[in-house]
Image (tube, rainbow, N blue to C red):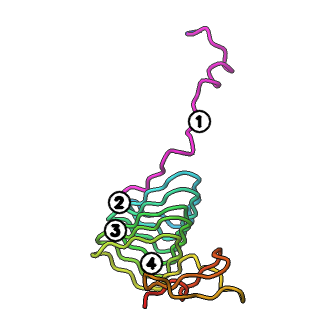
Amino acid sequence: MFNNKSKTEVMSEISVPSSASASIIAAGTTLKGDITSTGDIRIDGILNGNVYCSAKVVIGSNGVVEGDITGQQADIMGKINGTIKVKELLQLKGGSNVAGNIYASKLQIETSANFNGQCHMNAAPALTANQKPALGSNGINELKGDKSALTESSYSIK
């Protein structure tokens, strides 16, 4: 009556939010339960539950999570009481408070961040029988043989 477009034409013009958009739990909001997201998520409120995210997780300075966090990357500025598992970079920003174990490929902790727990970085495979660490000319142990596997002792400084 008011336009010449059919119902199917109007429905095809409605945009669906992309997975690149971020979900926000605002300050003053309290949630109980687990959150699963394919896009970025930012928590400035309180979550009593776990976060499962295939993108970046940001916990704001007023954000509190009583549960585990799993994601691709994470920036923590608030308080976490639980395990954090990140495939790439985990950043504990100034003023953050983490009580629990963390698992990450890369970790950055600012000086005023508080972390109590165990840190697990991606472990390297052990040396095989034909690989022997040897002291290099620069005073650092170098790996002789196949260099595809390194351990903590293969690059320690003497």
Task: Name the amino acid, label 1.
Answer: Val
State the CA–CA distance, disc 1 to disc 2. Answer: 28 Å
At a point 49% along the width and 82% down the height, the residue shown is 119
- Point out the tag, 3 or 2, that comes first from the N-terminus: 2
State the CA–CA distance, disc 3 to disc 4. Answer: 16 Å
Q: Name the residue under label 2.
A: 28
114 over 78 or under it: above or below: below
Number of residues whose C-alpha sits closer than 10 Å to that of mark 4, classed few (under 14), some (14–19) or many (20 or more)? some
- Point out the tag, 3 or 1, that comes first from the N-terminus: 1
Going by the picture, which residue comes out furthest to the right? 129
Residue 124 on image: x %, y %: 61, 79
State the CA–CA distance, disc 1 to disc 4. Answer: 35 Å
Question: Element under label 2?
Answer: loop
Question: Element under label 4?
Answer: strand
Residue 28 on image: x %, y %: 35, 60
18 over 51 or under it: above or below: above
- Residue 46, quarter of picture: bottom left
Task: Name the amino acid, label 3.
Answer: Lys
Nearest the viewer among 114 and 13 is: 114
- Residue 60, quarter of picture: bottom left
At a point 66% along the width and 80% down the height, the residue shown is 145
- Point out the tag, 3 or 4, that comes first from the N-terminus: 4
Q: Name the residue under label 3.
A: 93
Which callout, 3 or 2, points to the residue nearer the camera?
3
- Point out the tag, 1 or 2, that comes first from the N-terminus: 1
Q: Name the residue under label 4.
A: 81
Q: What stretch is highlighted in magenta?
A: 3-27
Number of residues whose C-alpha sits closer than 10 Å to that of mark 2, classed few (under 14), some (14–19) or many (20 or more)? few
Residue 16's mark? 1
Q: Does the magenta stretch include residue 113?
A: no
Task: Name the amino acid, label 2.
Answer: Gly
